Image (tube, rainbow, N blue to C red):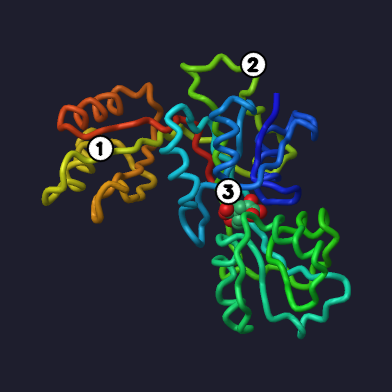
């Protein structure tokens, strides 16, 4: 059994994956070069599950993840994992920070530290992950470049942390999705995420209720179409915790909606909502149903 994650070693996603599967040995975890590569490895059955970032509290949705889920009809989300994100500035041993003119990282990490970057007039270069940027800097040994990312990326790639807590907002959280092939399609052996134990990071969150992620592809583009969809949930007393619109990619100005509902798929009201939406002619797809994790105060 293998668990794919956005690599290389040292990413935030690696930490999230190891929190979700706390009982598995280190060699179980397989770094992949990009988020689409993680999803592809799961969809092809090359690994039992994958872990990908989904949403950040400062920067919002990781679009490459949710778009990727749409293009893999066999995948579903089986767990969400919350991780506190601490961004650090790291350089090679021989770098003086006043020499730095460029900063490298994943686009989400760069965006989370935008005020810090603008303040110093640094040029941004995007990488597939924070640790990919760290690995490249370690290889090139440039003294005009710094990387933004987790302390684990510095440790893994031999860089020195010169500044910590550099995100625009210090209360910075990312939620990750554990994805696997739809349970009804695959009988994969023993890949259920481990129970959270008292010692690991995720134990800081109380598990409450369930959530279901649904994609609604509206039938037509008429005045009030979104309102009519939302009204179905409101009428049935279903609480929405997240909504995101993404282009259908068919025609400019047409959208599909990701809706996260605070209940499980076994809830009759949710089943009714899906039936009503379909009766109206809207397309629906359940992207997963999982326990809701909440940030503890
Ligand atoms: O690059 C990493 O270290 C990642 O795990 C990716 C990622 C993301 O895509 O959001 C994960 C958490 C942080 O929000 C920043 C980057």
Q: Secondary structure at mark 1?
A: helix
Numbered mark located on residue 262 in the image: none
Residue closest to the eye, 177 or 122: 122
Label 3, on which residue? 296
Determine which quarter of the picture holds residue 282.
Answer: top left
Distance Cα–Cα, label 1 vs label 2: 36 Å
Crowding at dot 3, Cα within 10 Å, few <14 / some 14-19 / many 20+, comes out as few
Q: Which residue is mark 2?
A: 189
Q: CA distance from mark 1 to mark 3?
A: 27 Å
Task: Determine whether 39 is above or below 275 in the image.
Answer: below
In primary-sequence order, the first of circles 3 and 2 is 2
In the image: residue 207, left or right of residue 17: left
Ligand number 1: quarter of image: bottom right
The dot on residue 233 is 1
Location of the N terminus (image quadrant) = top right
Q: Real-space Cα distance between discs 3 and 2? A: 32 Å
Q: Are marks 1 and 3 in contact (CB under 8 Å)?
A: no
Some atom of ligand 1 lies within 8 Å of the CB belonging to the residue at label 1 = no
- Answer with the quarter of the image where residue 26 lies: top right
Sequence-wise first label, 1 or 2: 2
């Amino acid at each position: 059994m293998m668990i794919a994650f956005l690599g290389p070693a040292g990413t935030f996603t690696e930490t999230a994956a190891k929190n979700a599967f706390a009982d598995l040995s280190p060699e179980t975890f397989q770094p992949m070069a990009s988020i689409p590569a993680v999803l592809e490895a799961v969809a092809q059955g090359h690994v039992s599950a994958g872990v990908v970032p989904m949403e950040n509290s400062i920067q919002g949705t990781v679009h490459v993840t949710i778009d990727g889920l749409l293009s893999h009809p066999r995948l579903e989300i089986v767990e969400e994992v919350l991780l506190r994100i601490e961004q650090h500035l790291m350089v090679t041993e021989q770098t003086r920070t006043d020499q730095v003119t460029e900063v490298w990282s994943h686009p989400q990490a760069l965006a989370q530290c935008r005020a810090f970057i603008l303040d110093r007039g640094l040029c941004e270069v995007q990488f597939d992950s924070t640790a990919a940027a760290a690995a490249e800097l370690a290889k090139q040994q440039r003294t005009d470049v710094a990387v933004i990312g987790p302390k684990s990326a510095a440790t893994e790639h031999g860089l020195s942390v010169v500044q910590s807590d550099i995100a625009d907002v210090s209360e910075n959280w990312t939620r990750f999705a554990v994805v696997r092939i739809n349970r009804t399609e695959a009988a994969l052996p023993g890949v259920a995420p481990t129970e959270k134990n008292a010692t690991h990071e995720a134990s800081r969150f109380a598990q409450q209720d369930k959530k279901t992620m649904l994609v609604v592809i509206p039938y037509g583009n008429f005045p009030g179409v979104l309102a009519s969809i939302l009204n179905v949930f409101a009428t049935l007393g279903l609480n929405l915790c997240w909504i995101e619109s993404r282009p259908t990619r068919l025609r400019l100005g047409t959208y599909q909606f990701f809706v996260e509902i605070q209940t499980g798929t076994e809830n009759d009201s949710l089943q009714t909502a899906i039936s009503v939406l379909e009766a109206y002619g809207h397309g629906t797809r359940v992207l997963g149903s999982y326990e809701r994790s909440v940030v503890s105060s």
